[in-house]
Image (spheres, grey):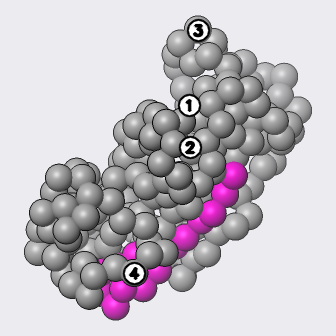
Amino acid sequence: MKKACLNDLANRVLQALRLWPALLAGGCASHSFDATHVADVRYKPSNVYLRSKVLDPQLKRVAVLPITTVASTEAFMAGAQLLEPKVADELEKAKRFDLVIISPVQLRQWTGQAAWRDDEPLPPDFFSRLREGCGCDAVFFTLLTSYYPYPPVAVGWKLSLVAVQGREIVWKADELFDAGDTIVANAARHYAGQHVHI
């Protein structure tokens, strides 16, 4: 089996997630993007950590936890609800893992809490409970750090993939995708023109 490049996986997920500010700003139900006249599509996420260039072949099953937010405002909650299925969709499209989407109810049963951030103290048996519950080799944490639903739309993500064995961070990204930034907006339109058919 061909080794999966971890950088490709991280970039694919981040590139797809940067699309959402442009879709939200452009009215996704009524607007189709034309990428033919987009001048600059060179945006590349910069705040990404990779433990290695190659994905460990032992990481076959990933538990995707519910999205968490930096604030419990109505806007953040609406953003999390809107974007949560998109995160799972983009991870699925990468075809690198068998994904297990963990519901807040399941997570509460297994760990005592319905949502967890990777930067908060986790219970000592957190990873072993998840492994017992769904057989995962790694856990995917998603934190919505910014969500501005009105133009110029901005979506901030803090994403982490943590291996159950050794509890090591496999990759981590912390990015703000702001549709007010011309490079981000053009790159999102270009991506949408190639990948999204509305």
Decide which of tag 2 and tag 1 comes sooner along the chain.
2
The residues tagged by marks 1 and 4 sit, at their Cα atoms, a distance apart of 38 Å
Say what amino acid the circle numbered 1 marks: His
Contact check, label 1 and label 4, Cβ < 8 Å: no
Task: State the image quarter where residue 61 is shown.
Answer: bottom left
Q: Which residues are magenta?
A: 162-176
Query: Dot 4 surroundings within 10 Å: few (below 14), some, or many (20 or more)?
Result: few
For residue 116, above or below residue 183: below
First reached walking from the N terminus: tag 1 or tag 4: 4
Q: Is residue 198 above or below residue 3?
A: above
Q: List x then y, in percent, for residue 59.
A: 31, 74
Question: What amino acid is labelled 2 in the image?
Answer: Ala
Report whether 85 appears left or right of 74: left
Choose between 82 and 91: the one closer to the eye: 82
Where is mark 4, residue-wise?
121
Earlier residue among tags 2 and 4: 2
Q: Which part of the image, by quadrant, shows the N terminus?
A: bottom left
Residue 153 covered by magenta stretch:
no
Of tags 3 and 1, which is closer to the observer?
A: 3
Three-letter code, disc 4:
Pro
- Element type where label 1 sits in the image: helix
Mark 4 against mark 3, which lies toward the viewer?
Answer: 4
Q: Residue at x 51, y 42 (%)?
A: 73
Label 3 CA crowd tier, 10 Å (few <14, some 14–19, many 20+): few
Residue 8 in view of the camera: no
Query: Residue 30, which numbered label?
Result: 3
Q: Are marks 2 and 1 in contact (CB under 8 Å)?
A: yes
